[in-house]
Image: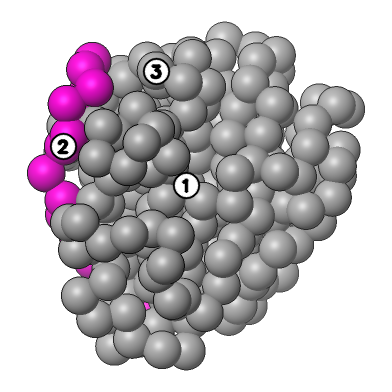
């Protein structure tokens, strides 16, 4: 189920790595009557991370083990969008320096329904609820029950990392009856240093059986003055057609005056 370190690109004193990826929720999970598309995220500093308790094993409808993936480094920015049809800039919930994360798409027909699957803790500690197998997802008390988008083909997300020495970009994405892809590039917008690329961070290669949600961790080191990470989520893995789910992003890291994350 879990995709560990697999793809790394380096240039000078900088790197971008597809550090981790996993299925975190599935409509096909048998314990919740086909409605277990919920995933839990905490940006609360007491317990930051993502919890999965309603995923299925890749390539099957069998339940996957629950797990918690703690975020590395301090949460610098987070953003989930949704709620407004055909406008991928509509913010559902955000925090930290939310201006560091921006979404764009050439798709012109999608909606803000997206199953409202996010359960997000911002100011309260989720405790065991972050990943407790058997928790009823309809009754979980979270600070935010987030939106998102469905029926979009693809989206491009730009994350400003110019003030960070290192950190991670956590990508929350999904697909419906398709195998998605997440490609990424770390850029020095001044053009001094070469681009660093990841060809696909969808490491487990899961072809979604109806709706499934995923998280991918893009870990970076930025000692060479890189400015941004841009990642592209394609719902069908090939173009801006298809039936995507999402979107959300969490940026963690250390500023240039702090210690590496």
Tag 3 and tag 2, C-beta contact below 8 Å: no
* Residue behind mark 2: 64
Residue drawn at the location 47% of the way across and 69% of the way down: 120
Q: First in sequence, mark 2 or 1: give its number.
A: 2
Q: First in sequence, mark 3 or 2: give its number.
A: 2
Specify whether residue 64 is painted magenta.
yes
* Residue behind mark 1: 172
Residue 132 in the image: above or below residue 243:
below
Q: Which residues are magenta?
A: 57-74
Q: Of helix, strand and loop, which one carries label 2?
A: loop
Tell me the CA gap for discs 2 and 1.
18 Å
Residue 69 in the image: above or below residue 241:
below
Specify whether residue 173 is painted magenta.
no
Q: Of helix, strand and loop, which one carries label 1?
A: strand
Residue drawn at the location 35% of the way across and 28% of the way down: 28
| Quadrant of the image occupied by residue 207 | top left
Disc 3 crowd rating (10 Å Cα; few below 14, some 14-19, many 20+) is some
Q: Of helix, strand and loop, which one carries label 3?
A: loop
Assign the N terminus to one quadrant of the image. Answer: top left
The x and y percentages for residue 198 are 40, 30
Disc 1 crowd rating (10 Å Cα; few below 14, some 14-19, many 20+) is many
């Amino acid at each position: 189920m879990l995709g560990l370190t697999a793809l790394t690109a380096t240039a000078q004193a900088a790197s971008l790595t597809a550090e981790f990826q996993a299925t975190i929720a599935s409509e096909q999970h048998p314990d919740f009557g086909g409605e277990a598309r919920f995933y839990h995220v905490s940006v609360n500093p007491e317990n930051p991370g993502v919890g999965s308790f309603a995923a299925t094993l890749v390539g099957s409808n069998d339940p996957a083990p629950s797990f918690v993936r703690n975020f590395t480094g301090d949460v610098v920015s987070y953003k989930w969008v949704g709620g407004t049809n055909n406008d991928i800039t509509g913010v559902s919930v955000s925090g930290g320096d939310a201006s560091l994360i921006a979404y764009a798409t050439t798709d012109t027909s999608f909606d803000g329904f997206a199953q409202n699957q996010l359960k997000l803790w911002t100011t309260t500690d989720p405790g065991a609820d972050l990943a407790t197998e058997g928790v009823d997802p309809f009754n979980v008390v979270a600070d935010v029950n987030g939106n998102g988008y469905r029926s979009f083909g693809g989206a491009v997300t730009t994350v400003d990392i110019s003030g960070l020495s290192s950190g991670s970009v956590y990508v929350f994405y999904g697909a419906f009856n398709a195998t998605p892809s997440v490609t990424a590039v770390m850029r020095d917008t001044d053009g001094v240093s070469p681009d660093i690329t990841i060809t696909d961070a969808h490491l487990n290669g899961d072809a979604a059986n109806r709706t499934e949600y995923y998280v991918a961790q893009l870990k970076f080191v930025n000692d060479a003055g890189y400015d941004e990470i841009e990642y592209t989520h394609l719902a069908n893995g090939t173009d801006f057609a298809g039936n995507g789910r999402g979107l959300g992003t969490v940026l963690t890291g250390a500023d240039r005056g702090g210690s590496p994350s």
